[in-house]
Image (cartoon, grey):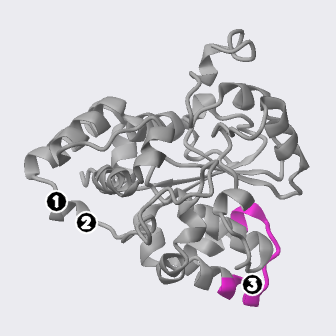
Amino acid sequence: MSQHTKNLDPRWGISSPHHDPYVLANFQARESDVLITTAPKAGTTWMQQILHQLRTGGDESFSSIDDVVPWLERQRADKSLQQVLDYYEAIPDPRVFKTHCTAEQTPGIGIANIILTSRDPRDCCVSFYHHLQNMTDEARQQANMTAPKTFNEHIDRWLEFAAWYRNIKSWWPYHDHPKVLWLRYQDMKSDLAANIDRIVEFLHWDVSPEQRERAIEYSSFQWMKAHDEKFSSQGDTDKPLFKAGQFIRQGKVGKHREIMTPEQEQRILDKAREMLEPQCLKFLELETG
């Protein structure tokens, strides 16, 4: 444990390549900030792209999405902890960050604008499986991850780590907070334009009809798939972190049915019913009663 982190409140979590508690504890949120607070593989990169395009009126020039919408808590090997904070402080308004933190570990609730996208846990589980399989060996080593030998082994690990469940459970008490906009992945897939309008209204951003159309175009699956390299390089190296063209993979709803057995589905849904409130399950369309 470093000198920086040993005296921190435990709420900020434990240091790892993708989690810097010191930065979280010392980050100064602004009222104009937007924090994307999704569980892994629940539309995070998609929302980074949507917000960047709305903020800029349409920008194709960036090399990596992390350059323009940084991952808030990711450790950065080329910067000291204070340099990371100074780098964030220098970003002009409106700043946009992504985070996979739970509500308890997210700085600035009630100050910053929070946008959360949730996705069916079965699809998140499958998407993360392919995410691990498509990483390069170097990228997995850098992230302290290993590829599972079987899909069933992956489900065991995914359920044990429980990132999706912890994220949803922590944010549900804020689902009707005036500074929180909770969007569902399936709704965004069925009508991206309508949900972009919801985002603009929530943030009170001035977006012209032409800028809106460019944001819709550049945030489409087709555009992002064709520019996969802009979204797959989010580390401290110039080397590819994923197999070519495999970061933006399919982005569909219900693809878990092609690989997941009924028993595996049941395990995932049972844990959701164990950890989440009935109203939350109904909102997520995991319960119909």
Residue 66 sits in quarter: bottom right
Task: Specify the label residue 65 is tagged with.
Answer: none
Q: Which residues are magenta?
A: 201-214
Numbered circle sitting on residue 211: 3
Label 1, secondary structure: give it: loop
The span from disc 2 to disc 3 (Cα, nearest Å) is 32 Å
Q: Residue at x 74, y 41 (%)?
A: 78
On residue 259, the disc is: 1
- For label 3, count other residues whose C-alpha is less than 10 Å away and answer few (under 14), some (14-19) or many (20+): some
Check if residue 169 falls in the magenta segment.
no
Per the image, the residue denoted by label 2 is: 255
Q: Position of residue 48 (x, y in %)?
A: 62, 62
Q: What is the crowding at mark 2: few (fewer than 14 residues within 10 Å), some, or many (at least 20)? A: some
Task: Give the CA separation, mark 1 to mark 3.
Answer: 39 Å
Q: Could you tell me what secondary structure mostly forms the magenta stretch?
A: helix
Image coordinates of residue 1 in percent, x first then y, are 63, 13
Residue type of the residue flagged with mark 2: Lys
